[in-house]
Amino acid sequence: MLLAGAPLVGGDQLLLRRRNPRVLFHAFKPIVISPFIVRSSSSSLKEVDTSSSSSEADDDRKLSSTLSGSVSFPPIKVAKRVVLVRHGQSTWNAEGRIQGSSDFSILTQKGEAQAETSRQMLIDDSFDICFSSPLRRSKRTAEVIWGSRQEEILTDSDLREIDLYSFQGLLKHEGIAKYGPAFRQWQKDAPNFNIDGHYPVRELWDRATSCWNKILVHDSRSVLVVAHNAVNQALVATAMGLGTEYFRILLQSNCGVSVLDFVPKPEGGSPYICLNRLNQTPSSPIASGTSAGRKASKRIVLVCHGFSQGSGSDDGDMSMDMLGTIQSQKTAELLLDLKVKSIVSSPRIAPTETANVIARVQEAADCLGADCVPRYVETKQMKDLDIHDILNRSKKESVKASSVESGWVNEFEDGLLTEIWDRSGTAWKSLLDELSNESEPENVVVAVSHPIVNIGLLGHCLNLTNDWIGSFHLDAGSISVIDFPDGTSGRGVVRCINYTAHLGRWSIPITRPTLDDENF
């Protein structure tokens, strides 16, 4: 669990997509709270027409990806950070009912506690405005997190949960008994799932795009959005230009926090977008054995090695400094909830030291008595996790640090980025081979490397191209967790990206202000 009062870690460094012009940018200007009152844009849920049937064109429409990044958002004048929070546990969450956009459930006692923990996570962060779903479970969560701030919460019906029509209110076994094939399609092929003449996931993606248009045109620098599981998934995916096939791939837990950064282009047009973190949760991100409601027995944990002596010029080829040692110990403690089978690291010094710390703690985890025999954790080195030679060919020292600096992709020549992408692709295949060991029905593999390598691994997991390599941010000491509920031959479900809450007092706020007032 997080310690009360520990702010959510969020570096003030942002990343640009690879296809962006070579423009560097810096930290956010101080957030100034303006004395305005925000009126609710919707006092009730929008009525959804369920009487019309789908057209033949809809019936014939095939699932298509928006991986081209074709979604265009309104231009912005200043950098904007948007923090997404899912509501706390609701009564229907606890009962296992399908909620959809119904408004019959409220927060449980646990949900109230989760909302309070999220308030503590974000207590040192400044926000100009809060957008919320009008549904009670989200509105209550927003009220707890928003606390004593004077501005009203802006509710928007487009932030309501996915519309599931006749499914809403059903328990799982009731859905199977009543709808059979349709319910199985909802579980296995949600983007093409059709009910009452509607395609709920496709409608949700359209609605999320509409939400972004309203959020981005609002005169604010830092925005809090409190909504729901499916709609927050859609908001993350549409912001990054990912299609409906990414539904249930980017996990959103109760009160999980995700952060997106939007940076204006000098020439105008749709802004640059970076996923700063995904699903930072009030509780441990690795304690649950399920992903999107399915049992996951295979898991890869990506660990960014701790800071090393002289970070910024060595790419982990020196021993960790005191901060790096603390980071590695905190990570090892977090992973105690898992029984790690093997740890793979870059052969460089800092990643190897981080891996050894994790292994020692794992091996001693079950050894409480004098006669106890420590559990063995296999550690090995993987050359493809090492990009030291590539970084040394870069002309800029800033790209070699343990935490990637702002606009790091712009420091590379195209050929070097291609090398990083290709090498991380080879490493990803090797990690899947390591994970697919048939003698280990439940297998957890930890990979320790430089943040840039781990970004490449995430990109390959999500079946992206190297154009997306600058769309993610990772900090030193962070972890990212990928589950495989369908085995290594199936798609990976990303449980969290850039999780850093375990670092405790060494955390910094998401919206960390700066003393300067630079324009972008």
Image (cartoon, helix red, strand yellow):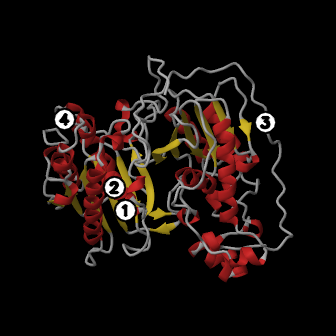
Which residue extends farthest right? 51
Which residue extends farthest front? 267
Residue 275 in percent (x, y) is at 47, 46
Pointer 1 and pointer 2: residues touching (CB < 8 Å)? yes
Residue 225 in percent (x, y) is at 62, 41
Q: Residue at x 31, y 52 (%)?
A: 454
The span from disc 4 to disc 1 (Cα, nearest Å) is: 27 Å
According to the image, label 2 marks what residue? 456
According to the image, label 4 marks what residue? 313
Q: Residue at x 13, y 57 (%)?
A: 371
- The tag earlier along the polypeptide, 1 or 3, is 3
Residue type highlighted by circle 4: Ser
Number of the label disc, if any, that sits on residue 438: none
Q: Residues within 10 Å of mark 3 (few under 14, many from 20)?
A: some
- The tag earlier along the polypeptide, 3 or 4, is 3
Using the image, determine if residue 382 lies above or below residue 3: below
Residue 74 in percent (x, y) is at 64, 42
* Nearest to the observer: residue 416 or residue 505: 416
* Nearest to the observer: residue 435 or residue 428: 428
Q: Residues within 10 Å of mark 1 (few under 14, many from 20)?
A: many
Tag 3 secondary structure: loop
